[in-house]
Amino acid sequence: MEKNPSSKYKIRFNDCDLFGHLNNSRYLDYLINAREDHLLEHYAFDLTTWYKKGVGWVVGSHEIAYASPAVYNEIVTIQSALLHADSHFLHVETVMMNTECSQLKAIMRTRLIPIDTKTGKKEMHSAEFMSWVKTLENHTIPNDISLQQRVAELRMALKSGAVRTF
């Protein structure tokens, strides 16, 4: 099972600032949308189906580092991975790079909290969900280091040319 799916996206004009750089707030949209695409394409996990069952997730926090600008008309590669799952939250990392995966554009770590969509209140993940989602965890990515440490690690790996997926 693919634990670090990736896909390519084109940076659109309306998502850019006057300098042709991807607007900072739009990075979140690209990264979140990529993860949703990865869930559906690689795991047949459709958020709409879960929402209809009364299960959803809200963002508890985002932590993002902008490493180099993504620019208008550029094709970027976005990879995502589940770092950790427990009954109270999911911890996801998404990484944006250039097409060749040789330059880091941005990295974001997101903590998602499960909720009951009917009540809007926090709810623990079910045992059934946990048994499935634990199979998606990517244990090769350190979950216990700071975002700044992770950026340094990725930059070093990219500079050495040794690693193309993270």
Image: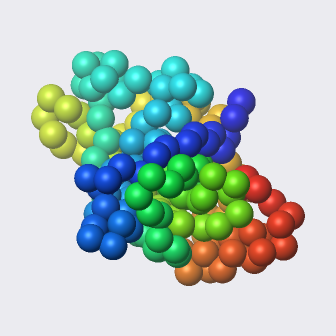
Residue at the spot x=28%, y=67% of the render?
17
Residue at the spot x=20%, y=32% of the render?
117
Residue 91 screen position, x and y as percent: 49, 54
Q: Residue furthest left?
A: 119
Q: Which is more toward the observer, 106 or 68?
A: 68
With 68 as the anchor, is 145 left or right in this view? right
Residue 160 screen position, x and y as percent: 84, 73
Residue 123 screen position, x and y as percent: 29, 40
* Observer able to see residue 78: no
* Observer able to see residue 77: yes
With 67 as the anchor, is 123 left or right in this view? left
Q: Quadrant of the N terminus?
A: top right
Question: What is the number of callouts on the image?
Answer: 0
Q: Quadrant of the C terminus?
A: bottom right
Q: Which is more toward the observer, 123 or 166?
A: 166
Q: Which is more toward the observer, 133 or 154?
A: 154
Residue at the spot x=48%, y=26% of the render?
40
Asked which quadrant contains residue 133, the reply is: top right
